[in-house]
Amino acid sequence: MTAGLLASMVLSAMVGWPDATGALTFAQRMTGVLFVLSGLVQGVAAVAAFDYWERRQVRISGALVLLGVLIALATDSLLLFMWLEEREYTPYLLMFLPLWCWSLWALVVLVREDCWKGVPRPKRFAAGVVVTALLTGVSLAYSTMYQPTAAPMHLSLKAKFGTARADRGLPFVHVPLSLYMKNTGGIPVYVTNDIYTVRGRDAKYSELPGAEDMLREWRETAGRQGNLGDVEFYAGDLRRTIISSSQVYGPGKWLEVGQEFSVERVFQIPKDAPYGTVSVSMQVSYMRKDRGKLDVDEFKTPHYTWRESEGRYYCRWEVCGQQLIYNGRVRHNNNLINVTRKPRFVRATWVPGEPPTSSISSMRFWDTKSSPREVRRELDRYGAASIRADAEVPVAELLRSAGL
């Protein structure tokens, strides 16, 4: 009995301590504190077990042992129930599964012993146990289900072209570009991937094409590299050419509530460029910071797939192209999920001009395939989302502002 109570005390402390000391929200910290306190109660119950089966000098020693066993049964049942949802191997399974079987045995033994005898007011004792269990359950439900979804998550993005300037020594026009983002939601967010891409659009123009000609040209050009599927009445064979592409804020960084970030970039276009318009597309992928803690030191380090020194991230460019891979461990802010699941990793792939991709799964390396169902579930669990902003300006306006 004492050995089982001491083991349960250790398990409760291991589950609750990370949340009690490092959770980002007050409710989650209180949940961790409750687990730590329940571990202390189990430690007291382990001491009371010696008195109950030896001298019985303390009248409520039997009730204390029963309380410790009930806490162990409730904790192990909760962990076992959460583990059954996914049935993934975790080292903690080797603790809470045997302890769950032990707690059932211990409860049977204590009931046969009528261990609650000697308690001055057994009904009040039972009521106190029930109330404590209900408060603990409400706290867990609040911190696990309601609280992480109550606060809104939202980013604001803006992209704007500035006044162009002509280069005196070269036949180019320098075009300033302003990129801006702000966390306008109610919670901090991690940026898992971002990109901006400037494209020039050129087309074959005609004065008065027929409707059939317009649709025919669209069918021929739709799906080409860089073509977004546009269709216009006086323009056919629309093509978009990548002029500039880079990161905005950088994967692994985060934005606090109300925090904003802006950057000024400059790109060049030839004075006699064939483009009719120039557009910019800015995309950001992010996740809630109140649901998970990302190992930013690991995640923000890029891996270059074309370098053999990258080990498992290496892939011949003829097969995989040239990509940047970001990978890092993410820990859920509710440690109950961490101890009943495999480790989860955030993976992001960055390619110039391509939409940024990011996923969350139990697969550590980028070359291992994850289940689409698992990825969708984990993205929802950690509150991952993406946002996009676009802007477009006529090249004639840029040339006029440059004095050409």
Image (cartoon, rainbow, N blue to C red):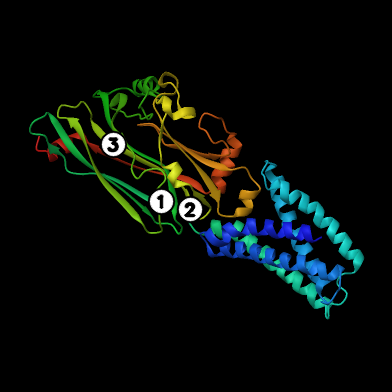
* Image quadrant where one finds the N terminus: bottom right
* Image quadrant where one finds the C terminus: top left
* Residue matched to label 1: 254
Mark 3 belongs to which amino acid? Answer: Ser
Pinpoint residue 134: horizontal percent, then vertical percent.
71, 67
Sequence-first tag of 2 and 3:
3
* Residue matched to label 3: 279
Q: Residue at 19%, 38% (x, y): give it.
A: 175
Nearer the observer, 322 or 386 = 322
Nearer the observer, 147 or 69 = 69
Separation (CA) of disc 1 from disc 3: 27 Å
Q: Tally the marks.
A: 3
Separation (CA) of disc 1 from disc 2: 8 Å
* Residue matched to label 2: 289
Pinpoint residue 42: horizontal percent, then vertical percent.
73, 64
| Residue 198 visible in this rendered orientation of the protein | no
Q: Are marks 1 and 2 in contact (CB under 8 Å)?
A: yes
Mark 2 belongs to which amino acid? Answer: Lys
Nearer the observer, 44 or 157 = 44
Query: Relative to 180, is 351 above or below?
Result: above
